[in-house]
Image (spheres, grey):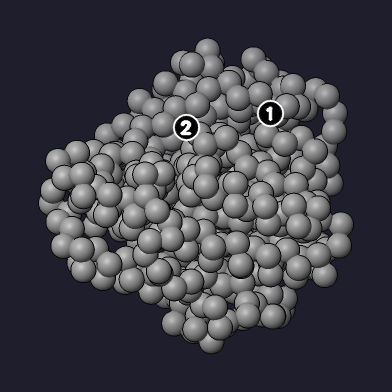
């Protein structure tokens, strides 16, 4: 498999440009020229201009390392300062984090009004919103940290997975900053960032660990062996749990300005979670995959049977109507989380067979902000004498801190690109990875139901790293 992956890898960088005239077809990649390995991360002392790389490293080609050799010098942690930029979906975020984990600033511009207006994410509208605020968000992050671009060590940015239109805005900004100030640039996998931000918060969290990553677009159970090496134990075969929460909120006529998840969670506290008998998805499938499409249909039918009109806001609903909506919200939340519990229990058992030394379950992503989810999963891990690690809510939803921190972890391993050109030509397009798996699928977790979702533009992050390791 490794040899075939070596053929699939491209000659361009994780953030490198390809001409628009080039035809890009799924499963068709240019021949591999393996990326150079930065044997020692290049450190930039705080408040000291970055020295220019040797001319051999100033080309726009990739310099992607797979070293896992740690850098433990105190000066490294004290001096490294990374700007993280995140625009994969509907929040424009930037943050600056020091190598020792100190968060110097964090700025997020929400698209809550657009979510409320369209009942979800509208990619073109989201792209325009990102474009309007990205410069100010990054500047605010610098101002709050009392820094200028010249005092940064590197720039980290999400390149996938996510919405292509939105990803492009962040990548363009990151390249402008990195190119203008001669900074290394670090490409970040969005889901790896959700998993690794827990290591910023919980200093005792070491590899290997199990991670449940749950958001509006993702349901992932992954075993994190070490940086850049993940085994996918389970994923969604259709919709993610966050999507189910958002749709339920919309159909119940809830306020979407803070997204559907918090709205459903709040209303569910008023309801009877046993009042509506929804079926738990995929009970007959003994794997770790998820499915929420059927539960969404059950919710929609329950709402219709009670004649609930979503056009009538919850604030204007009668007492009986509000009670009915609350019962549906509570019943939905109970079953949605029961599905998580069942899958997590099986995943813990599988993970312990593969990596008996794991001690933690990390739960991250937007849905991990839900306190009911946290409390139920805490009961699951207690059965196996594991510790539940959940980042604080502001680091569960999409944010720049997780991107900056993941950039720091990769920079330490020598995985970064040399500074890009100060100005990219208008007729070039960016290497974006809207569908980019994090890890390779665990054999016991394979599912025929996923056959229609196997088409993907890019090999997994794990495959790329492992292929590069084989080449060294």
Q: Going 63% across and 20% down the picture, which residue do you hit?
A: 49
Camera-nearest residue between 309 and 348: 309
Residue pictured at 40% horizontal, 69% vertical: 277
Does the CB distance between marks 2 and 1 fall below 8 Å? no
Label 2 belongs to which residue? 94
Residue 199, position as x, y percentages in the image: 70, 40
Q: Secondary structure at mark 1?
A: loop
Outermost bottom residue: 448
Looking at the image, can residue 160 be seen? no
**Residue located beneath label 1 in the image:** 101
Please name the residue shown 28% across and 39% down the image: 257
Percent across and percent down for residue 144 are 48, 16
Q: Position of residue 422 (x, y in %)?
A: 45, 36
Query: Relative to 104, is 114 on the left or the right?
Result: left
Picture quarter with the C terminus: bottom right
Decide if residue 462 is on the left or right side of residue 182: right
């Amino acid at each position: 498999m490794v040899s075939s992956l070596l053929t699939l890898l491209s000659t361009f960088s994780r953030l490198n440009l390809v001409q628009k005239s080039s035809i890009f077809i799924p499963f068709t990649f240019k021949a591999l020229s393996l990326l150079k390995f930065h044997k020692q991360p290049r450190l930039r002392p705080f408040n000291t201009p970055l020295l220019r790389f040797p001319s051999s490293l100033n080309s726009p080609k990739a310099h992607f390392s797979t070293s896992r050799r740690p850098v433990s010098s105190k000066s490294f942690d004290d001096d490294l300062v990374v700007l993280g930029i995140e625009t994969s979906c509907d929040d424009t975020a930037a943050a600056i984090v020091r190598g020792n984990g100190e968060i110097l600033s964090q700025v997020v511009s929400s698209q809550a009004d657009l979510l409320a207006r369209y009942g979800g994410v509208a990619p073109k509208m989201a792209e325009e919103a990102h474009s309007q605020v990205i410069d100010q968000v990054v500047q605010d992050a610098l101002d709050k940290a009392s820094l200028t671009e010249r005092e940064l060590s590197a720039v980290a940015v999400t390149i996938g997975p996510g919405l292509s239109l939105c990803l492009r805005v962040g990548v363009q900004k990151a390249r402008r900053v990195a190119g203008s100030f001669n900074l290394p640039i670090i490409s970040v996998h969005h889901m790896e960032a959700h998993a690794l931000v827990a290591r910023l918060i919980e200093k005792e969290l070491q590899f290997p660990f199990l991670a449940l990553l749950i958001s509006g677009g993702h349901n992932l159970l992954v075993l994190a062996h070490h940086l850049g090496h993940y085994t996918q134990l389970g994923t969604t075969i259709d919709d993610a749990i966050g999507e189910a929460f958002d749709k339920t909120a919309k159909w119940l006529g809830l306020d979407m300005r803070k997204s559907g998840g918090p709205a459903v969670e709040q209303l569910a506290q008023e309801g009877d979670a046993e009042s509506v008998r929804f079926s738990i998805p995929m009970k007959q499938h003994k794997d770790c995959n998820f499915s929420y499409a059927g539960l969404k249909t059950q919710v929609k039918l329950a709402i219709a049977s009670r004649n609930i009109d979503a056009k009538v806001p919850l604030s204007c609903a009668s007492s009986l109507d509000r009670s009915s909506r609350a019962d549906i919200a509570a019943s939905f939340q109970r079953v949605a989380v029961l599905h998580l519990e069942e899958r997590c229990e099986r995943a813990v058992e599988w993970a312990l067979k593969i990596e008996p030394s794991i001690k933690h379950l990390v739960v991250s992503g937007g849905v991990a902000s839900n306190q009911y989810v946290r409390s139920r999963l805490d009961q699951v891990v207690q059965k196996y004498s594991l510790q539940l690690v959940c980042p604080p809510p502001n680091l569960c939803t999409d944010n720049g801190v997780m991107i900056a921190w993941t950039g720091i972890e990769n920079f330490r391993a020598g995985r970064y690109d040399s500074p890009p050109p100060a100005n990219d030509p208008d007729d070039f397009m960016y290497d974006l990875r809207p569908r980019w798996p994090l890890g390779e699928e665990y054999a016991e977790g394979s599912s025929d139901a996923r056959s229609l979702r196997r088409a993907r533009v890019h090999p997994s992050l794990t495959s790329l790293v492992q292929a590069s390791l084989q080449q060294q």
